[in-house]
Image (spheres, helix red, strand yellow):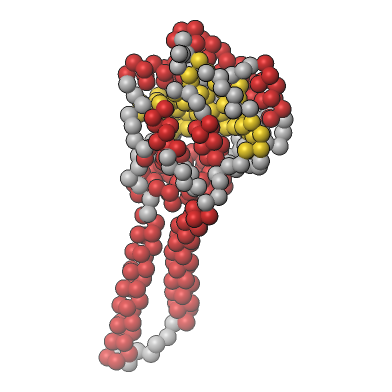
Amino acid sequence: MNELISIIIPCYNEEAVIPLFYEEIKRQSDFMQNKFGVSFEYLFIDDGSRDNTLSILKSLAETDRRVKYISFSRNFGKEAAMYAGLKNASGDYTAIMDADLQDPPKLLEDMYKSIVDEGFDCVATRRVSRKGEPPVRSFFARLFYKLINKISKTDIVDGARDYRLMTRQMVDSILSMGEYNRFSKGIFGWVGFRTKWLEFENTERAAGETKWSFWKLFLYSLDGIAAFSTAPLAIASVAGFIFCAAAFTMILVIIFKTLIWGDPVAGYPSLVCIIFLVSGVQMFCMGILGQYLSKTYLETKKRPIFIIKETNSTEDIK
């Protein structure tokens, strides 16, 4: 029996680029099928798109039996789409790719050979440049990777993409982590396994517009920090200790100044500033606690990570 490679493609309002992506991935998979004798399935995850994404996927499925699609009841986010793809992929090897062609399909050949010939469990990709990306966004992205690698025990590579090819064993290990608040870049590193990194120059989208605004990326980074580090909680504790010590010291200073030198207690403006400062630190620490508490609250609800509205992925292509 030929080995099967599952390609997972999360899609959200990607009607402009899906035909282009399909032609590229079809060309690459046909080449690999002739060269290595492997079979492919394309598992498109329609993440509640509001355009004609689902209609295009249905049309492709009618002409190519390798095309599978899963359509969500609403937009659950890319993390949920990747999880759904991994859960429904039946391949011996599984790859995750974006539909915008920023993940070069031609790298699949090197990925497959590295796993088969060199014994790696995963071959992942990282960008060595951020060409075409706004400078401010690039700056904060690099800052995030530096920060999370300092405060987390999980190795998260700077510039890492979700684009990677994995063995079935690694996929099963990822699926065993059924947490609701998912940060896949951290999960990939946490499960371990031998990983080879392929570097490539950043390419811009082939068509359409990015769905990741600066604010969404910021919230996503907070999810990553909360999911793979408890350092912010330690920071809140340290901040509380420092301010308690500072307040105790100031009390002693005021008492000695009043008893020894008879210095009157004054300074309304400075008192207001101190109150605002301490209140701000308290609110900041409460915000940190709130982030962890909210994540715990969502986990305890045991809500499904995604809900499927319709699919054709139940068909066996092996």
Q: Position of residue 129 (x, y in %)?
A: 46, 29
Q: Which residue is rendered at x = 48% and y = 66% of the image?
A: 283
Q: Position of residue 174 (x, y in %)?
A: 42, 37
Q: Position of residue 87 (x, y in %)?
A: 51, 34
**Can you see residue 100?**
no
Q: Which residue is rendered at x = 39% and y = 62% of the image?
A: 236
**Can you see residue 282?**
yes
- The reply, left or right, for residue 259 in relation to residue 163 is left
Instruction: Say which quarter of the image contains residue 313.
Output: top right
- The reply, left or right, for residue 101 in relation to residue 232 is right
In the picture, which quadrant includes the N terminus?
top left
Residue 51 to residue 248: above or below: above
Residue 101 to residue 283: above or below: above
Q: Position of residue 3 (x, y in %)?
A: 45, 16
Q: How many marks?
A: 0
Instruction: Say which quarter of the image contains residue 243.
Output: bottom left
In the image, farthest residue toward the top: 34
Residue 80 to residue 124: above or below: below
Q: Which residue is rendered at x = 56% and y = 19% of the image?
A: 317
Which is nearer the eye, 254 or 218? 218
Residue 203 to residue 190: above or below: above
Q: Which residue is rendered at x = 57% and y = 26% of the image?
A: 43
